[in-house]
Image (tube, rainbow, N blue to C red):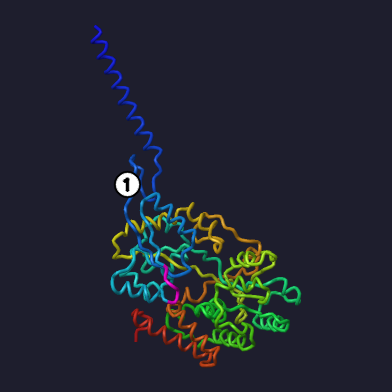
Amino acid sequence: MRRKLWMLTVFLFAIVLIAGCGGNNAGNAENEETPAGTANTGETPAKQDITLTYLASQGWIFDSEMELAKKFEEQTGIKIDYQIIPADQYFNVLKTKLNAKEGPDIFGGQSGKSEISLNYNVLENAVDLSDQEWTKREDPLSLEQLSLDGKVYAQTIWDTGNSFVMVYNKKIFAELGLTVPKTYEELKQASLKIKEKGITPIYEPIADGWHHVLWFAEPGPRYDEITPGLYDDLNANKKKFADDPSMLTALTQMKEMYDLGFFGDNTFSDTGSDTANKLATGEFAMSLSAQSVVGDIVKANPELKEEDFGYFVIPLADNQFYYINPGGPSKFVYSKGKHIEAAKQYLAFLAQPENLQYLIDNTPSFTNLNFSGLKDKYSDAQKELFAAYPKKGTDIQNFVSYVNPQWMDIGKDIAAMFGNSIQPVDILKNIDKRRDDMAQIAKDPAWAK
């Protein structure tokens, strides 16, 4: 009797033990956090021992993204090896790697149809990302700049609405009785008064090689307004840059600004990284800059407040459009890479709403991003800027083919114009020649003989 009772007790205990173990396993599966891009199957996904190489130009990767990369590694085991190259060397390094078929898992590049077609040859070098979930939330204008034949080849996460505008010191303007200029002549007269007071009107960093091109390219919507259909005609090879009077006017006005000393004596050695510090000293009244620079100015000089600065658009050719650049630094997955799926997983992770919001909240130069459903951090001055310029249009380099890929060459031409080596019309002719060359390489039907 005792033996039977003992055996029954052991049997019941075994049943309870098995049931308890099964219940614990189920509970753990339900509570397990699922990493990005992984289905919850009831089992903890194994972490992957992978290192993704990511080649990018200096200035394209912020500390906030690197922090997210650490989080991504914690979740997946996938490491991100950032390889940052100086801006003036980046494209040559990337081109060498792509030509040798030794590209990184992810490579950075500027968006724009002619850019991705000619400079990066995405049809051969990049993975089609059209089926990725985040493409449904990214700004369609940004996606358009990354697409060929209806396929999306990269991801842009950028503050595309934060256009470069004139950032001006309100105190200096008020002391001299100046108002926001709406025409080039008004900008010229205001700058002359500022210069008379011993203040350099505009901080312009030509040394970077690219910044001064913005003066010419951003007012593109104004050129298209003065000559209706200009953008479309340029893309159809029905018109040339050298034939357009408004673009010639803008370059001529740039030359006059330089000759009048509005950019100061050191403009050829000035760099963009010094913009905030220069404006913080009060020695400069204005600068063409990202709107977020105001925060950096205030950090450089605590005696200043953000409300001491305002914004207006570049008024060359009497432009009053708020020009928009829907593109920006973008991430391409290398088509011959060994870790394509892991690279896609990283892009999907970055595009998660909570991670996009983290980038906005923790990147000083971001006030918003080009994805839906996010909370911006626009200042009152920015809101006033947007309200002051209801007319909006896309800048020339992001609409007209074969302009963005020659950006640095245009910069060299403008610098040569400042030095009296060439004339404004020569810059336009050079742009046309380079466009012709690129179109022929691309076998663009609009350039077919």
389 or 266, which lies in front? Answer: 266
Q: What percent of the width, then of the height, locates residue 280? A: 65, 70
What's the amino acid at mark 1?
Answer: Ala
In the displayed structure image, the side of residue 352 where residue 284 appears, left or right: right
User: Can residue 218 be seen?
Assistant: yes
Quadrant of image for the N terminus: top left
In the displayed structure image, the side of residue 73 where residue 162 appears, left or right: right
Region rendered in magenta: 84-88
Residue 273's quadrant in the figure? bottom right
- Secondary structure of residue under mark 1: loop
User: Can residue 385 be seen?
Assistant: no
- Which residue is disc 1 drawn over? 46
Please determine whether, in this image, residue 160 is positioned above or below residue 213.
above
Residue 368's quadrant in the figure? bottom right
Q: What percent of the width, then of the height, locates residue 326? A: 49, 68
Residue 286's quadrant in the figure? bottom right
In the displayed structure image, the side of residue 20 where residue 420 appears, left or right: right
Image point 52% across, 86% down: which residue?
415
32 or 199, which lies in front? Answer: 199
Q: What percent of the width, then of the height, locates residue 284? A: 66, 76
Quadrant of image for the C terminus: bottom left
Please determine whether, in this image, residue 417 is positioned above or below residue 293.
below
Q: What percent of the width, then of the height, locates residue 434? A: 41, 85
Asked if residue 180 lies in the magenta stretch, the reply is no
Image point 36% across, 51% down: which residue?
77
Image point 36% across, 43% down: which residue?
40
Label 1 environment density (alpha carbons within 10 Å; few <14, some 14–19, many ≥20): few
Q: Hey, which residue is sitting farthest top in the picture?
A: 1
